Amino acid sequence: MKIFESLLEKILENIAFVFVSALVAVAYFFRDIIEQNLIIIALFASIFLTISLFYLIFYKKTTDFAIRGFRLRNGSEVKYHLTHFGVLWTYYLPSPISYSPFEKDEYVWVLGPYCPKCFTSLIEKKPLLKKKEWFCEHCESSYVRPKGHKYEIQERIKDLIEANVYRKQG
């Protein structure tokens, strides 16, 4: 798994290098056009930045791939389970063996929700005239779903885990 992740990292680095190089080359050859249309380019850049910031604020973290650090799980994490909001959550903590004495790794990956009866991934369902709920297609069980987007709920679970694990360690 580490080989795949390091290969993916190298590929992403090369793609980023080629993209930046191409951008510089295009900017050099079209510098006269760019100078004439600077307002239009600035408008598109500001729209792109606004959309990117909106995305980072409201959908800032996914469970498998963190945008800000391009962070992937390295496979040495320890898997745990937690029952919260009446459903099962799986979370991964960095292995204590993999801690560096210079840099302590305090990151949590949260996956879920899962059905506590059959461990199947739950889907969101909105019955007519009712609040959203989690539904298990395998055993047809329903669970009350708290308000918020799925990633916001996962963030609350992550904050709970971090408070219980890392803050207790001091």
Image (tube, helix red, strand yellow):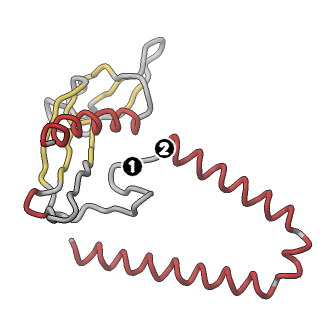
Few, some or many C-alpha atoms within 10 Å of disc 1 (few <14, some 14-19, many ≥20)? Answer: some
**Residue 34's quadrant in the figure?**
bottom right
Residue ID for mark 1: 62
Answer with left or right where residue 6 lies relative to residue 41. Answer: left
* 110 horizontally vs 38: left or right: left
Relative height, residue 132 to residue 152 (above, below): above
Residue 50 versus residue 150: which sits nearer the camera? 50
The kind of secondary structure element at disc 2 is loop
Taking the view exactly as shown, the residue that stands out farthest to the right is 36
For the N terminus, the quadrant is: bottom left
Q: CA distance from mark 1 to mark 2?
A: 7 Å
Q: Is residue 51 above or below residue 29?
A: above
Mark 1–mark 2 contact, CB under 8 Å?
A: yes
> SS of the residue at dot 1?
loop
Residue 147 x, y percent position in the rendering: 41, 23
Quarter occupied by the C terminus = top left
Amino acid on which the number 2 mark rests in the picture: Tyr
Q: Residue at x 40, y 35 (%)?
A: 152
Q: Which mark is residue 59?
A: 2
Mark 2 surroundings within 10 Å by alpha-carbon count, few (fewer than 14), some (14 through 19), many (20 or more) = few
Q: Residue at x 12, y 53 (%)?
A: 78
Picture residue at 44% right of the left edge, 78% below the top: 13
Q: Tell me how many marks there are.
A: 2
Toward the top, the furthest residue is 129
* Residue at 14% across, 64% down: 101
Amino acid of disc 1: Thr
Q: Position of residue 138 (x, y in %)?
A: 22, 34
| Position of residue 103 measured from the top left corner of the image (x, y, whole percent) | 22, 62
Residue nearest the observer in this picture, 152 or 169: 169
Question: Where's residue 164, x and y in %?
Answer: 17, 35
Up-down relation of residue 112 to residue 35 (above or below): above
